[in-house]
Image (cartoon, rainbow, N blue to C red):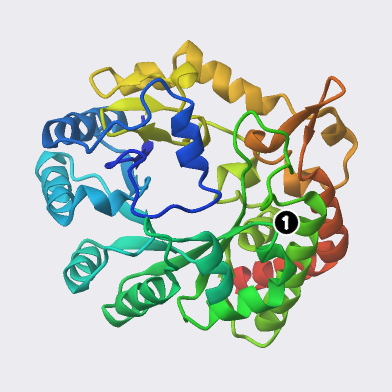
Amino acid sequence: MGFISVLVKPASSLCNMRCAYCFYADESEHREQKSMGVMTQETSRRLIDAVFAAAGKRGAVSFSFQGGEPTIAGLAFFRKFTEMTRERNHDRLPVHWAIQTNGLNLDAEWADFLRENRFLAGISADGTRSLHDRFRQDTAGRGTWERVAGAVRLLKERQVDTNLLCVVNRETARSPKKVYRSLKEFGTGYLQFIPCLDPLEVPRGSMPWSLTPDAWGRFLCGVFDEWYRDWQSGNYVSVRQFDDWVHMAMGLPPGTCASAGQCGGYLIAEADGSLYPCDFYALDEWKLGSVDENLKVLIAGEKMRRFVQRSARKPAKCSACRYYRLCRGGCPRDWTEQENRTENFFCPAFQTFFAYAEERIARIAAAEARALRR
């Protein structure tokens, strides 16, 4: 079948933090069963076998781990999972490893494991100490910035490939330059900014920390100025959204489904082995099946087909938008119904940003294209 990408929830929605805006805590509350506990070794084996069977003899596989907080499953779980993957990879397919973690459980033993198995480690850090400690607290209500910063420093020391993920909420968006500079100081070289999601079944923009389109647009412009200045000076920092838009301006495919405007690029494996089409839709209504079924059949099945087709039906405004080639309608999780019309909640933000940055994006794309031809 080719490339199979699976995002594994080894500890389901279990977490040792209580982030104010956590979308998965809200999402799991909307399921009949909130948490599926911790994935067993037997479920891991069945998942691994199902993935290799679907990939075929000449495919490739990606296992990414997320939560909740995936490290709650324990280092022994990860050691066994990677060991079983090597043992059961009879056709020696390429396997890519990644983990997205809040960093609280990481220590030297974890860091060595991640390096030895060539994991890409994503650490969640909300820009600055004050912002992070306000929104990303542990179960006792204490700020976690210092512990997270220590985890990032440890991973760097142990030479683990690391990127930083910042959730942008209303307060974060007020300080784009300060947030960018603070995260850049860690020296990982890779940053990702994602807009904060409101809970399901509440009006967009109605929470105290909700990110508004105006705030998101101004944040993107502010970060872009700093990022562009670094690019000009030869001190390049990878910002995933900007990388995507430059690649698209070069005629290359983007690296994320949101930038591509196309759902269906990966599967979610919950701790009990149930499968879903997207992290934002790990809901009962979108359950595809389980690891005990043929993944090829599930991926080609009616429910997955309906899910993918949803993203193909773009908001009507997209058809006449000059920026569609870069935006592509965005993520359907951001689509809202306004007066019987489907619109991307953040459409005004993208309009603002591309009007501000389009010329410089094109300039970078042309320079990168020339460099590739050399």
Identify which residue is drawn at 88% across, 41% down. 321
Q: Nearer the viewer, residue 254 or 282?
A: 282
Q: Nearer the viewer, residue 284 or 171?
A: 171
- Residue 267 x/y as whole percent: 41, 33
- Above or below residue 298? Residue 104 is below
Judge whether residue 310 can be spotted in this image.
yes
- Above or below residue 1? Residue 152 is below
Tag count in the figure? Answer: 1
**Is the C terminus in the top left, top right, bottom left or bottom right quadrant?**
bottom right
Identify which residue is drawn at 78% across, 58% down. 215
For label 1, the residue is: 249
Identify which residue is drawn at 16% across, 46% down. 81
Give residue 180's quadrant in the image.
bottom right
- Residue 287 x/y as whole percent: 42, 20
Element at badge 1? helix
- Residue 66 x/y as whole percent: 37, 47
Q: Nearer the viewer, residue 134 or 120?
A: 134
Amino acid marked by disc 1: Ala
Judge whether residue 191 can be spotted in this image.
no
